[in-house]
Image: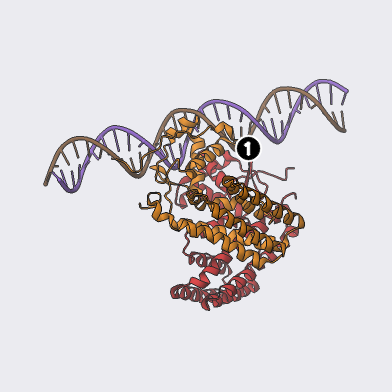
Chain colours: A orange, B red, C purple, D brown
DNA sequence: TATAGCAAACTAACATGTTAGTATACTAAG
DNA sequence: CTTAGTATACTAACATGTTAGTTTGCTATA
């Protein structure tokens, strides 16, 4: 009857497994639920239900909603309700643009300023990635991929850039969850990572930038058909 | 006796002059106070005093603190206190890096995708800037400068990028408040804006990018001596 | 049947009460 | 005079009560 069914908030996990303030733990729990589509786009987040399920009061849940709203994962409708945002290709493209802007700036800087130690880490990490691909451990490779990109940003020496990028690219990451990992893509990804590291080794900022640019473009290309494949997840379905 | 004197929260203005939710208005009021150094770096924000001064309860003030914390304007020390963050050259450099990454990506895109209408706006705005410089209306020019940069980002077609950039560059903007506007700098700025628009007119992304890059670098150069000039505003003074 | 008005139920936003952790000032011991 | 211990005052974080605005579904009317 109702396409925008409210959620039962089952299986949210236990917030006691996490650290930090109660608000942070609630936020983390809800974020995970949204990214994994336990809370699908359009779902109404019922505060009372979530409070009960997690065993907390409304204060930390309210603060969690506020943070998720800033990340673009929920829409707060004043005096009315809070819903999981639908995916939108516009938002995804914007998130991709923002991520690309920051990652390109980062890799450009790292390519010119890199230390030998940093280069050694990158090369060692490439070998790790090779092993994971050989073992066909694709969820392991997914994690290693994330680590590769975030460490590259850490190497800029700017501490906040990693968390900022992940927050800005949240829409992108949510959509990425819908892509099934394929063996072929893992091999390609590894190859592209190698080209990037090669450019960093040669301290060639322009080459590093364009290699990273091509690498990141691939994601948006793979995401494009998603809107037709699962229209119910997108806005105005 | 106490260098980190608490503030009397005088002259915070009236929140009724603003729109939006109470939290937003409180946040805006406090942000303005921090940026204008009414609340100097290191000052302790006393929630009770602020509540009384603004005539609101602790809820909206708490939420405002949380937002300002994300912008890096205040440090929340759990179970203890909330203080205005000191300036730090590291933070300022990071903010400059982030702003530059986003603005360069934006101007590059705009230079290749621009419409005739957008170009016309930019050219018209340059004439406005000329008039302001001729009239020596430097505070007017300051505003026009902001408008020039933000509209350039709006022209990317991505709606969130302007507010994101301003939030990420908050540390930079705070430091910029300390620079006194000089006639010479306004003339230079206008000249640099003209070079950027010229590149956009010619649909030359690389030229636009490097023109913007040089333009933005100037700010950091002018900011560099600040740490020696007013050490009390910086961390570990 | 369609529609306008109304009431009940729900929600975000705000106010206020409570708890637990932190810093500071004071006191007592060395 | 210095230092260790303690008590007090303060705060963020959390819980709960209240308010005002929105949506939904019902009913009465055309």
Asked which secondary structure carries label 1, the reply is loop
- Give x and y (percent) for residue A51: 47, 32
Residue B215 lies in what quarter of the image?
A: bottom right
The quadrant in which the N terminus of chain A is found is top left
Of residues C23 and B5, the one nearer the viewer is C23
What residue is at 52 percent from the left and 59 percent from the top?
Answer: B161
Of residues A124 and B86, the one nearer the viewer is A124
Residue B209 lies in what quarter of the image?
A: bottom right
What residue is at 56 percent from the left and 35 percent from the top?
Answer: A22
In this view of the protein, can residue B153 be seen by the observer? yes
In this view of the protein, can residue B160 be seen by the observer? no
- Give left or right: position of B142 versus A87: right
What residue is at 59 percent from the left and 75 percent from the top?
Answer: B207
What residue is at 56 percent from the left and 49 percent from the top?
Answer: B30
Task: Report in which chain the residue with disc 1 lies.
Answer: B
- Give x and y (percent) for residue A95: 51, 56
Of residues A180 and C7, the one nearer the viewer is A180
Q: Which residue is mark 1?
A: B78
B235 lies above or below A14:
below
């Amino acid at each position: 009857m109702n396409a925008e069914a409210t959620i039962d908030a089952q299986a949210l996990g236990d917030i006691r497994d996490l650290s930090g303030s109660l608000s942070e733990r609630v936020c983390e729990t809800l974020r995970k639920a949204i990214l994994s589509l336990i809370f699908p786009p359009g779902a109404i987040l019922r505060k009372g239900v979530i409070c009960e399920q997690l065993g907390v009061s409304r204060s930390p849940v309210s603060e969690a909603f506020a943070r998720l709203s800033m990340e673009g994962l929920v829409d707060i409708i004043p005096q009315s309700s809070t819903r999981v945002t639908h995916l939108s290709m516009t938002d995804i493209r914007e998130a991709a643009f923002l991520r690309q802007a920051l990652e390109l700036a980062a890799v450009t800087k790292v390519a010119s300023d890199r230390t030998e130690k940093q280069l050694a880490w990158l090369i060692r990490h490439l070998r790790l990635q090779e092993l994971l691909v050989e073992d066909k451990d694709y969820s392991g490779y997914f994690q290693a991929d994330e680590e590769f990109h975030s460490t590259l940003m850490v190497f800029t020496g700017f501490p906040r850039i990693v968390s900022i990028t992940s927050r800005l690219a949240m829409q992108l990451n949510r959509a990425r969850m819908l892509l099934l990992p394929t063996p072929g893509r893992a091999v390609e990804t590894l190859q592209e990572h190698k080209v990037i590291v090669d450019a960093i080794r040669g301290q060639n900022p322009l080459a590093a930038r364009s290699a990273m640019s091509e690498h990141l473009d691939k994601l948006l290309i793979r995401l494009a058909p998603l809107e037709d494949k699962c229209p119910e997840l997108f806005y105005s379905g």
